[in-house]
Amino acid sequence: MNSSKNYVLLIGNGFDIAHGHETSYLDFADYLLIQLSQRIFTHLSGALASNPYFDDRANINLRHIALNKRNDVNQDFQDLFEAFLKSETANSHKYIHEVLIEKYLDKLQLILANKFMAGLFRNRSSSNNWFDIENMYFKNVKDIALRKPYQNQRLKNLNKDFNDLKTELSDYLNNQNYSVNKEIHSYFGTLAKSIDSLTIINFNYTPTLDNYQKLFPVDCEIFNIHGTLKKGNIIFGYGNDQNDEYRRILELEEDEPLKNFKTFEYLRDGVYSSLLERIGNFSDYEVYVIGHSLALTDKTILEEVFSRKECSSINLLKRTDLKNESNKIIENFKKLSYAVARVIEDDKIVRKIIVDQDRTMYFP
């Protein structure tokens, strides 16, 4: 396999996590549970006006509790409210994981106005603590859109819930502190001396990568493919336009199911087209994957990068924190290899293009 001096880095949320930043969807889910506890506490402390965060039945029952009319309170609501109120005085993180997640997540549809959010928590309680927002969104879209009769209002409700959650995510990420990691700083400094050009496809919304820009070579371009918190233009949705069910949704000739597909969000500015123009001008390039799961939610852009004839190799960088755990290194490498195969869909190319595990470098 020939070596190229043109590097393309794919940077995903694992890059932020390597800095110790709490930016995963599971971190966000824990934050939402803490926020829910605080909202319940505030409501019961005398804020008697209806809260749009709760559905109508929950607001009624909260009002009864606040007015000490407990005989009028549904027992399921009372049990749920009391469980969340305890997290105000308990060790929040421990209580969330040992009590709320174990016993109460599947009941949040009783109180949350945002039914998409409630569904995510219900799925988390039954799926090994997973909180997969974008995949769950697409599942909801296709379940509604492809069921007869077509129900446009249900899709509108889903999109409102999804966009409200997007706002919550932005608020959460905007309140994080984004620091520099010394090992990563050294890594980028060394990398810059050994290459001719660097293209960074940043899938994160956060400003973490900004802290390292002075280290990059002169010929470096960063493409914030999903927008940034700073500009307030984040792209949040589903990104596999090769899916058969997506083609069926297109054939409905309805707009509502398409409103959060990344294919159309990429058309808002010139980032996507500028990226393709840049890598298309290389005679060859090597891809290095840093902290990205390569999930199908980003297949649209991943296929464009991986499947070009100029792409000479894909390096699935290994995690330094797993260096002494060989089984986890092997499992993680396999998982990423499977993900590449789902993107490229040609096993012959996959075997040729992925740099084997033993020759793959570690990322700090």
Image (cartoon, rainbow, N blue to C red):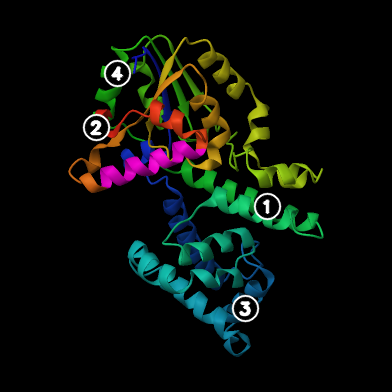
Residue 207 location (% of width, % of height):
44, 31
Residue 183 location (% of width, % of height):
24, 30
Q: Local crowd at mark 3 within 10 Å, few (<14), some, or many (≥20)? A: many
Foreground: disc 2 or disc 1:
2
* Foreground residue among 96 and 73: 96
Foreground: disc 3 or disc 1:
1
The amino acid type of the residue labelled 3 equals: Asn
Asked whether the residues under the numbered discs 1 and 4 touch, taking CB atoms below 8 Å apart as contact, a structural biologist would say no
- Residue 141: image tag: 1
- Quarter holding the C terminus? top left
Please tell me whether mark 3 sits on a helix, a strand or a loop.
helix
Q: Residue at x 51, y 75 (%)?
A: 81
Task: Look at mark 4 in the image and give the residue it sits on.
Answer: 191
- What separation in Å lies between label 3 and label 1 (alpha carbons)? 31 Å
In the rendered image of this protein, does residue 273 appear above or below residue 14?
above
Q: Earlier in the sequence, mark 1 or mark 4?
A: 1
The amino acid type of the residue labelled 1 equals: Val
Foreground: disc 1 or disc 4:
1
The amino acid type of the residue labelled 4 equals: Leu
Task: Evaluate whether residue 177 shows in this view.
Answer: no
Please tell me whether mark 2 sits on a helix, a strand or a loop.
helix
The quarter of the picture where residue 273 lies is top right
Q: Local crowd at mark 1 within 10 Å, few (<14), some, or many (≥20)? A: many
Q: Residue at x 51, y 33 (%)?
A: 344
In the rendered image of this protein, does residue 303 appear above or below residue 142?
above
* Foreground residue among 335 and 231: 335
Task: Look at mark 3 in the image and give the residue it sits on.
Answer: 61
Task: Look at mark 2 in the image and give the residue it sits on.
Answer: 358
Q: Earlier in the sequence, mark 3 or mark 1?
A: 3
Q: Earlier in the sequence, mark 4 or mark 2?
A: 4
The span picked out in magenta is 328-342
